Image (tube, helix red, strand yellow):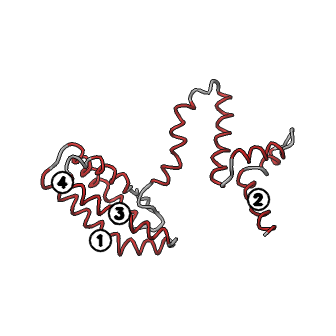
């Protein structure tokens, strides 16, 4: 299997937003085309289309817009060789273009990595603060707590409620097997099963 790098339309877009003041006559048409691609993505997401359908929609609707967008970007870059933020935006878009197209050719991929970035942002933002826990043991304990809290969020659990319940249920000298029964994933699964049994 060949691994292909995928690009991010949000990063391409961001650079044009940053360069808007420099040449709105160039950036606005580019941003409008990007907005049309995002509109198609939004519509497709609402229908919960499976990957194969997303791929067909992208090939038929988004790819022609992307081709027009590429022509506009390449044309702007070759006609006046702009400098500054606009030059950076055009060059970045051209360099990332083949990677971005990978997203349009694969319905399993998103056209940007915003979802992934939003998931890792809390950990990244906190990384600097976590360097100063005071000791290696404190760092390990906090890493465990942060992992539990992140897993609670993934499972849709209120972290405070989860910790309260686990502290009540877990025996003082609990074994690893007993603790494993109360991971956020198993705790959430048990709650779902209880709710279904009642319904």
Q: To which residue does mark 3 refer?
A: 101
Gap between marks 2 and 4 measured at Cα: 57 Å
Quarter of the image with the C terminus in it: bottom right
Q: Residues within 10 Å of mark 4 (few under 14, many from 20)?
A: some
- Residue 90 percent coordinates (x, y): 24, 52
User: Residue 77, labelled with which disc?
Assistant: 4
Q: Residues within 10 Å of mark 3 (few under 14, many from 20)?
A: some
User: Residue 40, labelled with which disc?
Assistant: none
Gap between marks 3 and 2 measured at Cα: 42 Å
Of labels 1 and 3, earlier in sequence is: 1
In the picture, residue 6 is in which quadrant?
bottom left
Say what secondary structure mark 4 lies in.
helix
Question: Which one is in front in this view, the residue at disc 1 or the one at disc 3?
Answer: 1
Q: Residues within 10 Å of mark 1 (few under 14, many from 20)?
A: few
Of labels 3 and 2, earlier in sequence is: 3
For the image, the number of numbered tags is: 4
User: Residue 64, labelled with which disc?
Assistant: 1
Of labels 1 and 2, earlier in sequence is: 1
Q: To which residue does mark 2 refer?
A: 191
Give the answer, above or below, for where 187 lies relative to 64. Answer: above
């Amino acid at each position: 299997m060949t691994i292909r790098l995928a690009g991010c339309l949000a990063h391409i877009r961001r650079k044009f937003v940053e360069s808007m003041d420099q040449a709105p006559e160039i950036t606005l048409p580019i941003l409008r085309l990007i907005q049309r691609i995002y509109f198609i993505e939004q519509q497709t997401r609402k229908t919960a289309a499976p990957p194969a359908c997303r791929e067909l929609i992208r090939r038929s609707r988004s790819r022609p817009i992307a081709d027009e967008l590429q022509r506009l970007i390449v044309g702007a870059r070759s006609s006046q060789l702009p400098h500054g933020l606009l030059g950076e935006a055009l060059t970045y878009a051209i360099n990332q273009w083949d990677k971005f197209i990978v997203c349009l050719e694969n319905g399993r991929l998103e056209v940007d990595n915003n979802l992934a970035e939003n998931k890792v942002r809390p950990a990244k933002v906190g990384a600097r603060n976590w360097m100063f826990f005071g000791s290696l043991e404190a760092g390990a304990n906090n890493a465990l707590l942060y992992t539990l809290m992140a897993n609670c969020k993934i499972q849709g659990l209120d972290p405070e409620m989860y910790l309260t319940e686990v502290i009540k249920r877990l025996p003082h000298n609990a074994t690893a097997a007993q603790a494993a029964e109360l991971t956020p994933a198993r705790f959430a699964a048990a709650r779902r099963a209880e709710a279904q049994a009642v319904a």
